[in-house]
Image (cartoon, rainbow, N blue to C red):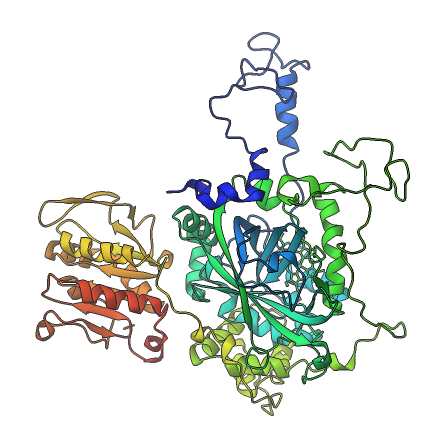
Amino acid sequence: MAQNGHNNPNNQQNKKSKQLDQYRNDHKNSQLTTNQGMKVSNTADSLKAGERGPTLMEDFHFREKMMHFDHERIPERVVHARGFGAHGYFQVYEAMSELTSAKFLQDPSVKTPVFVRFSTVVGQRGSADTVRDVRGFATKFYTEDGNYDLVANNMPVFFIQDGMKFPDFVHSIKPEPHNEIPQATAAHDSLWDFVVNNTESAHMMLWLLSDRGIPRSFRMMEGFGVNTFRFVNAEGKGRFVKFHWKPLLGTHSLTWDEAQKLNGADPDFLRRDLWDAINQGDYPEFELGVQILEEEDEFAFDFDILDPTKFWPEEQVPVKIIGKMTLDQNQDNFFAETEQVAFHPGHVVPGIDFSNDPLLQGRLFSYLDTQLLRLGGPNFHEIPINRPIAPVKNNQREGFHRMAIDKGAVSYSANSLRENAPEPDPEQGYRHHAEKVEGRKTRKRSDSFNDHYRQATLFWNSMSLPEKEHIIKAFHFEVGNVKDKTIRQRVVDMFNHVDGQLAGQIATGIGVNPPENPGGSGETASSPAVSQENTIKQAATRKVAILIENGFNMDDVVQVTTQLESAGLHADIISKNQGMITSAGGEQIEAVKSYATASSIMYDALYIPGGKQSTDQLMTHQDAKTFVIDAFTHAKTIGAANSAVDLLMTSDIKQITFADTNTANKVVTDLGIVTIRETNDLNAFTQELIDNIAQHRHWARGNIDGKISG
Ligand code: HEM
């Protein structure tokens, strides 16, 4: 196992990794010192006047140690406080010179180092990973031309149209200030009060309440730059651009029930998943895509391309895939890297510029401003994780915690004492796109931003039936938690402008009236690309739980695990008790988890090998039965071989066709339940299992009443 990915050959070439090496310290074979480098003789007892006497003021070691501890915390981010980072690299597929002069997008042989931080938005730093929320997906590219930050989210639109409203929106969704309740959720009065009074949020609320709000893994999320940016080529020609990250594992989600249970069982579920994947060599990969719009097509759509509550449907503006990012190295220190990294949409490089999107314009002020407070002054660009690999040369000086030792008398320009160095470079230096701007000062929003509903309807139209059901259930939870009935009614009335049926179904679950006149926005189009049903389906890196007890059939375990592992999946043996379990043939295998430490919600699929004695025992364990039923209700793939099929047949799973004596040696699959009997050859069975796991879920199960008794 490549611990933290440090040993992989790529990282030995990675310029950012090499730069960080000078700060890395494993403290191996070292002696304890004070911060002044003086060796310490005892760090367990304070200096006292007599063994039972008071601690002395002169105990500098005690005071230094305690002082440092007392000052360990810094403010958490005002939004996106909980996050997790990883290192990697990005490679462009072909030169992009026609579209942009950005140097890191020209040479396919160049590996540009990156650091990515995934995050939730609302919860505090210690909140749970699997809450319903937008996920941040921020990438710092350490390019030869300086740092470029693509500060993205996992949803392509935003709640508001103008940066001016950001403090209002965030105040409404954060815990309510009088009692700091509730944590990390939109399910409360103040957020929905904001929504009904700011109807531009309709579209984003649907994304938030969709499966996108509860991703299965950071490795299985799309990323979107949201705001419209600009590519500019060497000739100065500008084009509008939207940025996309596409995960090679596809875009997949948890179920709401899993997410809720994981909040308690493993609040670190998503960060653990990323950390483990990188340590196991399952390096997450994301392709970078761009949607390009010629400047002359700025007004070609029935929405304003500067409006961040709108996306550009891929069916209208295709996504061109231009490169790939691979995350292959875990951080060494959470605080030094994930906590101190400072992203900013204003960190651009020549060839990438802004648009007049009023949300983006607001962001351009906010990030630097907040980081001055969060990271203690103007020198946080010198913190190792934030340092560019390009040289930094300017006349900025001093401030708290200045690291650079800038020599000489000159700290100004223009100067003659140092021949005007460091000197601006009119050719290579950043040049803002010479967009013609004209207008009267006004606080008015453009009328072209007035439509708040059509794209919300487009999104709703694009959802599959199960996705629609999940959204309605999410409304029932989120709005059902709103105490003020007037607000609940207004939510229904507001979403009646999106879709009358949707509004009616929301009303049914939250104790208010359905709309008198079911409405809608009149939008009939859909965008299949936004439905997760149409994403990449891939089994590699998925986790399979294997349930056994003493007397299991070793061959059923070995054949399947070997084949799963060679297809890139991972399997954990789970039993009533952790430790060695003995097979029918007397061989032993280790159960790495027990029902106390593992449950179905932590796995993508379940497999139960045969062995009569094992099956008989599993049938008597309530925990084993719960494992099976949870996997079934969460629409996961379940496999059973030989006698283990009896376990499924006697469980509460109904109306599924299982392998029986008439189908000896044949694989039988019904709605993701894969079974086989009376066989020693599990090759075809395992392949079928893998193909079913790749489907991620088997929703059709849920649509058939009576599949689960009770
Ligand atoms: C006017 C609108 C917005 C404002 C004022 C704003 C402001 C902020 C602030 C103050 C932070 C904390 C930064 C820090 O402490 O380092 C932050 C973090 C973040 N924002 Fe925004 N934001 C806005 C909209 C957006 C949008 C549209 C996106 C997605 C495209 C986004 C993505 C992120 C991400 C990913 C982070 C976390 C960065 C990290 O991991 O450190 N924000 N935002």
x then y, percent, for residue 647: 18, 63
Instruction: Write the residue at 8% across / 75% down.
Output: 662
- Taking the spot 47% from the left edge, 22% from the top edge, the residue there is 29
Q: Say if residue 652 shows up in the picture.
A: no
Question: Looking at the image, which residue sits at the far top?
Answer: 50
Task: Looking at the picture, tell me which residue is in the foreground, 322 or 398.
Answer: 322
Determine if residue 178 is in view. yes
Image quadrant, ligand 1:
bottom right
Q: Is residue 531 left or right of residue 565?
A: right
In the visual, does 636 lie left or right of 170?
A: left
Q: Is residue 296 above or below residue 53?
A: below
Residue at x 69% of width, y 84% of height: 300
Q: Position of residue 686 (x, y in %)?
A: 22, 63
With respect to residue 661, does 142 lie above or below? Answer: above
Q: Picture coordinates of residue 423 (x, y %)?
A: 82, 46
Pick the front one: 97 or 405: 97
- Whether residue 77 is situated above or below residue 457 in the rendered picture: above
**Quadrant including the C terminus:** bottom left
Q: Nearer the viewer, residue 362 or 25?
A: 25
Horizontally, is 479 left or right of 101 in the view? left
Q: Quadrant of residue 362?
A: bottom right
Quarter of image, res 101 = bottom right
Residue 355 placement (x, y as % from top left): 74, 68
